[in-house]
Amino acid sequence: MRREEVLAACRVGLWRWHGGDGLVRLDAVEAELLGLPAEPAALTEPELRARFHLADYVAAQRHLATSAAEGRLGEAELRVVAEDGTVLHSLRSRAYAPESERTGGPAAPGGLVGVFLEVPALGHPAASALEQAEDERRVREAFLLDAGQALSEAHTGREVLRVVAALSMPGFHPAATGVFSLEGDRLRMIEYRTRGTRPERDRETEETIRRALPRPQHINSRNPAAEALRTGRPRYFSTPDELRDSYPEIWRTIASLDRESWAYLPLVVSGRTIGVWLVAFDKAMAFTFEERTLLAALARLIAQALARAFLHDTERELSDDLQRAMRPAPTPSIPGMRVAARYVPTGRGLRVGGDWYDVIPLPSGRVALIIGDVQGHDVRAAAIMAQLRIALRAYASEGHRPDAVLARASRFLAALAPTPESGGDPEDRFATCLYVEVDPSTGTLDVARAGHPDPAMVLQDGTMLIRPTAGGLPLGVAPDGDYPTTRLLLEPGETLLLCTDGLLETGHVDLDNGWARLRTAIQGMDDERLADPEEMAETLVHTAQHAERAGQDLDDMALLLLRHPQPEGREAARRPVRRVVQTIAQSEPDHVAAARRQLAEMLHDWHDPDRVFGATLLLSETVTNVLTHTDGDALLVAELAGPPGDRLLRVEVADPSGSLPHRRDPGELASSGRGLVLMDSLADAWGVAPRGEGKTTWFELRERPRPERRSDADPGEGPDVTFGSGW
């Protein structure tokens, strides 16, 4: 015989409680021992407590909780009671917490597994009337505490109504509950649930009630709910005759439901009646002073919970309306490009914030991509965001360059700041913004930045590089601020990534760790998903939301992706190449460090750190010599190609000077002249090639070192020209 069959033959019932859903699951034997139909059942904790004597239940809870915490078997004896409190028989329970339940944590909220066995009646002395009254008082207090806790954890109206329908305690077993809500001068039933043991009949009963009350009733209509609402006093009907004599019209509707008693209690919050709670019983209720007190206390708890839930629902509807009203227009198509955008609202308050994005066709045939973030997560931040977005769209549509658009927008936002004379909020608001002007025909990007995170580029093979750009202060901080422009190039097969800090800092991480999280997510995508900006957007948003810590709300976030697809047939025809193009001006020597970081990010999957260090050192040496010993800017092109493990890095740095380098022999104390020595020592190959009036200095470095090395520029040959003093 199976184990379950042996236990059933011995009249041993099985039960399990899991903290995840709060339900106690019983097998057929256990259900029968508790006076339920002999079939598997699932009870809530209040429903289970209603089946036992309160003193026994409290003691059993204490013993079993202690045993579970200590990892040992727990044992308790409990008296099963009828609805009127009469003791039916006694049960002995033995339970334990499985190891996975004792460890706790998010994946294992806790639980118990146990058995029940009927035993001879416990030898409890007969309780005096005073002791019985004290037990009943403790029952009511425990019930109200549980009900209050459950109602306080309900956030929406639907959750509150579900908790109300599940209320159960010894002596208080409603057959049905309903809630009427006041809407203007009408009373509408928003919920009606039965508590029978036959689901088919329960559904028929609920449908009968809904058909009987198809539309809201006027508050002056003749029915007990409307009267309780008008007078603010509850109405109790202990027998069917009382309800039939007082409201014959209502009685004709509910006579077939086999109810015996009814209570209609007004739901009052801060002196304002917001609805009525209906409680129907299938047995006669005397509605004693204690029972009426209990129902009144429950009505107050329900009213407060419903008021909070209705306010929450109203705020949510307002938030949704605001989001729809301020949502950008449908993203226009860009010839030769693919665009994907996302906005995820905050989880706090009205769930509105200051993040936004926009895609604007320009008179020149180019397209402007804008993403930004207004300080704050409230209605004012959303209102400022809407005004600023309109202003930016107007300035861009006039044909201004990116730096001029941001400068005008900064003055506009500064002018919105309230003055003491206006009586407005004295808090100044600022906004970060990233403005990118795209030339779809060439992939050229002109970027202006106002205190916003830098853009990033996802290369053909999924490598993500942060592209440093020149920038100014956030909009509104300095009305006369300057916003320099940086030019980038979006190659075919690459994707431009613009985002707000909400996407990066969710989970209370800094920007660097946020970028690292996105980089890891992108590297886990296959080629097909990398080529689809919509798939990439979904992956990045999901990654940020998954990083949310328990109990913390998400910051709102905006994301904008622009992909430059490969021409037809080329996506699979060639191996992906990592390529970075950057111009470093004479006035931007600090960008040399940014170029080193970009090259290191490009070589993130090289396993030899010495090779990576050598590459960044050679890059720094080459670019620094251009800035130090010529009058022009340095144009940097870095390209990585080849199969993993045997990839080749080629770096070219072009400058306008025609002077070629030659080897020097610096002394021990010299501070310069070792450039060619470094090139010979670290590069697998290097050279100098004339380009028009200038030249290009290049070097190559393989992922793994090779014995043979070559140089296309023999320092002993060529014109006797010294390339400054650095080589």
Image (cartoon, grey):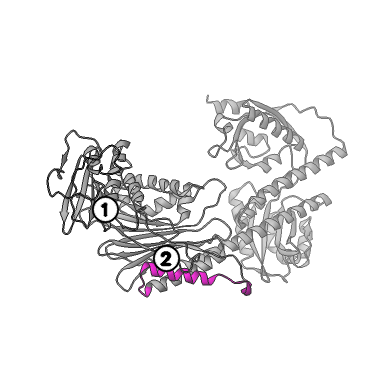
Q: Which residue is at the front of the view, 262 or 689?
A: 689
Left or right: 24 as drawn, with respect to 677: right
Task: Identify which residue, 297 or 53, lies in the foreground.
Answer: 297
- Asked whether residue 590 is drawn in magenta, I would say no
Which span is picked out in magenta?
A: 397-423
- Label 2, on which residue? 482
Crowdedness near tag 1: few (<14), some (14–19) or many (≥20) residues, C-alpha within 10 Å: some
Of the pair 598 and 249, the residue shown nearer to us: 598
Work out whether residue 581 can be spotted.
Answer: no
Q: Main secondary structure of the magenta part?
A: helix
Q: Position of residue 717 (x, y in %)?
A: 12, 45
Q: What element does badge 1 sit on?
A: helix
- For badge 2, the amino acid type reads Asp
Q: CA distance from mark 2 to mark 1?
A: 29 Å
- Image coords of residue 338 (percent x, y): 31, 60
312 relative to 430 in the view: left or right: right
Amino acid bearing label 1: His
Q: Which mark is residue 629?
A: 1
Residue at x 28% of width, y 46% of height: 621
Labels 2 and 1 touching (C-beta < 8 A): no
Q: Secondary structure at mark 2?
A: loop
Residue 75's x, y, as percent? 68, 27
Q: Is residue 3 visible?
A: yes
Position of 384 relative to 15 (above/below): below
